[in-house]
Amino acid sequence: MLLTGAAGGVGTLMRALLPAHGYAVRSLDMVPVEGEPGAITADLGDPEALRAAVRGTDAILHLAGISLESTFEKVLRANIEGTYHLYEAARAEGVRRIVFASSNHAVGYTPWPEGDEPRVPAETRHRPDTFYGLSKCFGEDLAQLYWDKHGIETVSVRIGSCFPEPTTVRMLSLWLSPADGARLFDAALSAADVGHTVVFGASANTRGVFDLSTARALGYEPRDDSEAFAGKLIAEQGERDPALPEHQVLGGAFTTDPPIWPH
């Protein structure tokens, strides 16, 4: 399996966790991958290097790209054109399964469900909150095109926030633990007949806002819950305030101008 973005935050976590699920990981990043002298250093803008990196693999976990808001030109090159180059390399080399790291920011202007309102389903229409979120919408639509036209299957995972532990009160609802992330990516890589499937990526959080039914249908069984961190975070930051504009939509502070990190 080819892992793009292997030197990044989520990529580093998955390099450590996916081998236990039975994967032989071939790492790729635009910068050297620490501790892996055999990793491939290549840019998503280099189609020939991508073809060479993809050659002989049976699947791709695509995590590479810009993970925060940036200028449109930078997002265009890394996230939009880069993802296109990767899909073209997969098509040319006969790779039939890609797991695409999408984001909750593809639907960032979707209202936050309050009280007894149902959790947000995976079929929620695109409502990007940034150029970054827009690039994830493009990636999902590109995946649909390559399934319909070329038969390349993709699971697009709208990741909430994948960190060792949540760092904000908002993140208590969106957190994807690294261990659950590996379980979800394993399910997405191994499930049969996925076509193009969109799922939300989160743990079994007590305060969760995502409907995980499409992820569970792949065989994903989350085991972790952010509630273990709730007391400390609420004591430090206070409860989430629905009166604040950035707390009224899924994208949170990505919808402020300028956006406030982290996501």
Image (cartoon, helix red, strand yellow):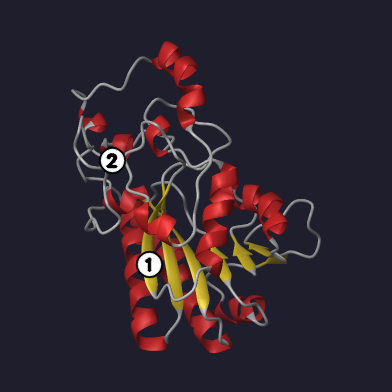
* Secondary structure state at the residue bearing disc 1: strand
Sooner in the amino-acid sequence: mark 2 or mark 1: 1
Residue receiving disc 2? 250
* Residue nearer the viewer, 188 or 164: 188
Quadrant of the rendered structure where residue 179 is?
top right
**Residue 84 makes an appearance in the image:** no
Q: Where is residue 203 in the image (x, y as percent from the top left)?
A: 47, 42
On screen, residue 259 versus residue 13, left or right, reads: left
**Residue 246 makes an appearance in the image:** yes
168 is higher (above) or lower (below) than 48: above
Seen at 32% across and 70% down, the residue is 141
Residue receiving disc 1? 197
How many C-alpha atoms fall within 10 Å of the one at disc 2: few (<14), some, or many (≥20)? many
Residue type (three-letter) at the residue carrying disc 2: Leu
* Residue nearer the viewer, 35 or 177: 177
113 is higher (above) or lower (below) than 244: below
Q: Where is residue 156 in the image (x, y as percent from the top left)?
A: 41, 63
* Mark 2–mark 1 distance (CA, rounded to whole Å): 21 Å
